[in-house]
Image (cartoon, rainbow, N blue to C red):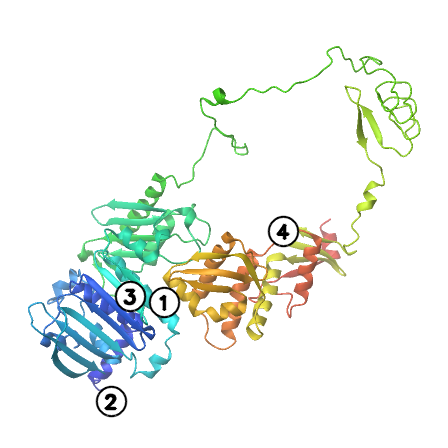
Amino acid sequence: MDIRILPSNIANLIAAGEVVQRPASVVKELMENALDAGATQVTVVISDSGRTLIQVIDNGCGMSPDQAVLCFERHATSKISSADDLQDITTFGFRGEALASIAAVAEVTLKTRRQEDVVGCQVEFADSKHLSTEEIACPQGANFAVRNLFYNVPARRKFLKSDAVELKHIVEEFTRVALTRPDVGFTLSHNGRDIHVLRPAKSHKYRIQDLLGSSAVDKVVDIAAETSVVSVNGYVCRPDLARKTVGNQFFFVNGRYFRSPYLHKAVMRAYEGMVSEGAVPSYFIWLKVDPRSMDVNIHPTKTEIKFEDDSVIFQVLSACIREALGRNSFGGGIDFEQAADAPEMPVFGKKFDEYRPEYRPDSAFQSDYNPFETGSGEYAAAGATGGYGAAGDAGATGGYGATGAAGGPGGFGASAGGAKGQGGPEWEATPYGTAQFVKKREDYGKLFEDKTLPSSAVMVLQGRFIAAQAKSGLLLVHVRRAWERVLYERFLKAFSASGHVSQTALFPVQVNVGVEARLTFDAHEEMLSRLGFDIAPFGNDTIVVNGVPEGFSCDAASVESLMADVLIALDEDNSSLPGMMESAMARKFARIGASRGQTPSTAIEAQRLIDALFSCSNSEYTSDGHRILTILSLDEIEKRF
C-alpha cells in the first residue's frame, strides 16, 4: 500500500465538493462574507443561473493587497485566533474554507479597497492558483466575480440542473441571508433583470413583506418569550391559513439561518388540533441563545446546529406559539350551555324591538263553526252552477260538491257515499267549504318512468363506492382509486402524444405564489403544458392560470388550491431517467386529480366511470399497486345471512 500526501489543488477540489455544491452555495458564502465585513449594501449579479457569472458586490471594510491574496488560502480567517474563540462564534464564517473552495472550481477575480487606501487592488485566481495582482481604481469594499463554475470539474458541471432550478436555489439562499439582516439593503438580478431590490427595513416584518409579499405577513401572529436559556421572537401564521405547500418555514439563531426537524416538531405540536392533516403553517422564528451553548461546526455549510439544551428550547418554543395562538382566539372553544346538535341562533341587540315593525296579518274565521255538525255555516247551501257546495245534496253541472251524493257530468264528487266524478281526482272539504285536492291519478307516474338505465342496476354508495351486478356476484369499485387509474393513463398518454385536453377558464385566475415557486413553474412549463395546464407568468412572483386539465374545476378557490398541490408535486425529487420521470409525474397528478375529482352522484355517471376504468390497460390496480375493484360472490353474500 502506497500512502502519499495529496497535492494542495486536489485537496482543495475535495474540500470544494463539501462547501460548493451548486451556484447557490457560492452566493451564500459570498453574501455571508460581505455581512461579516460590515457591509450595508450587498448586490448579487447572476448570469445563466450562475454557470457563467456570480458577482457579489459590497461596501464593507475591504482588504489590503496582501490580505486579498491570503484570503484564498485554506483556513485563512480573521474570525478566530485561538481554540477558545470556537466557543463564542458570532459571525457567519470562521473556518476560512469558502474562498479557497470557490477558487478551486472556478475563475475568481477580486477587486477590493479599504477606506484608508488611495487605490485598490485586483487579484485573480483559477484552479487554486494565484494568477496576478495589480493596482486598480475601485470603490471601498469588495467585488467578487466568479466565472465558469466547475470548469475544471466537468462531472460536477454536467450534473447541474436546469437554469430555472438552479436560479430557484439561488433565490432561496438569497432570501435566507436577507432575512437575517433587515438593516442591510440587498439587490438580486439575473441576466439583467432585477428579481429583488430590498432597501433597509425597519423590522423583520417589513423585510418579510418585501421578500415574500404582503400575503405572508397580513395574517400572522407575533410570538415572544424570554427565558434564561433562550429568547424567542418571530411570527407564525394563523391555523386556517396553513397549506400543504412546504415553504416559508424559517429558523434563525443568533442571526444565522439553520434547519431543525426537531424544532419543527415543536411548532407542529403547538398547532396540534388546529390544522388539517398534511397542512404546514408558515413561520419565521428568531432565537437568541448563549453562543457557548450551541455548536455550529457540525456541518460544512453550517446549516445544522446542535444545542446544549435542545429539549428546553423545544418546550419553550411550543408553549410560546400555543400561548400566542390561544391569546388570539385561534384555539378550539367549547360552549357548555348549548346542546351539541342545537342550531346556533342569531343574537339581536337590546333595541331591536324598538325598530322592529309590528305586523299582524288579517285572519278571517267563523267563531261558531262546528265541523261535527252538518249543514252549519253560511256555505251549507247546495252548490249552484259554477259554485262550491260544502254539504249540498248534489253538485250541479260544472260545480264541485264536497259531500254531494253524486257529481254531475264533468263535476267532482268526494262524499264517502257518493260516486266519484267521471275521470276526476278526489277532493275534500276544507273548514271554509272550499274543495281541496288530495289524491292524483294512480297511473300519473307512468308518464315519467326512466327507461334509460340498464337492466343491471348501478348504485353509488355514499360517494365512495360503486356497486353493480356482475355474472358471479356483486361488483364493488373504489371511486377515488378508479379515478386515479383513469387519470394516470390519460396523463401518461399525454406525455407520449400531443398533450392532454385543457379546459379554458371563463375568467383567468391570478395566483400569487412567490418568487421561488414562480421559478419552479417556469422550470416545468413544457411538462405542465402537455398535461393540460395553461399557465402564464405575471411579474416576478405571480402566475395567471388560463386553463386546467379536463375534469378539474376552474373556479378561483379550486385553482389556487390546485396550484398549491401542483407545486408540492413539482418540488419533490423525480428520476431523470427517460420514462421514469413521466410515470412519476403522471402518478402524482393522477392522485391530485382523483382527490379533487367530482364524485358520481347518478347511476349514469357511475356507469361512465366504470366504462372508462375497464378501457384502461389495468383496471384492477392503481399505478402504485392498490386494488381498485373486487367481486363478492353469491356464496360470500349468502354466508352473511
> From the viewer's perspective, is residue 386 above or below residue 194?
above
Under tag 4, what secondary structure?
Answer: loop
Cα–Cα gap, marks 4 and 2: 72 Å
What's the amino acid at mark 1? Lys
What residue does disc 2 label? 2
Q: Nearer the viewer, residue 570 or 184?
A: 184
Mark toward the start of the polypeptide (2 vs 3): 2
**Can you see residue 348?**
yes
Identify the residue shown where x is 27% and y is 56%: 252
Mark toward the start of the polypeptide (1 vs 3): 1
Mark toward the start of the polypeptide (2 vs 1): 2
What residue does disc 1 label? 168
What's the amino acid at mark 2? Asp
Looking at the rendering, which quadrant does residue 126 occupy? Answer: bottom left
What is the crowding at mark 4: few (fewer than 14 residues within 10 Å), some, or many (at least 20)?
Answer: some
- Front disc: 4 or 3: 3
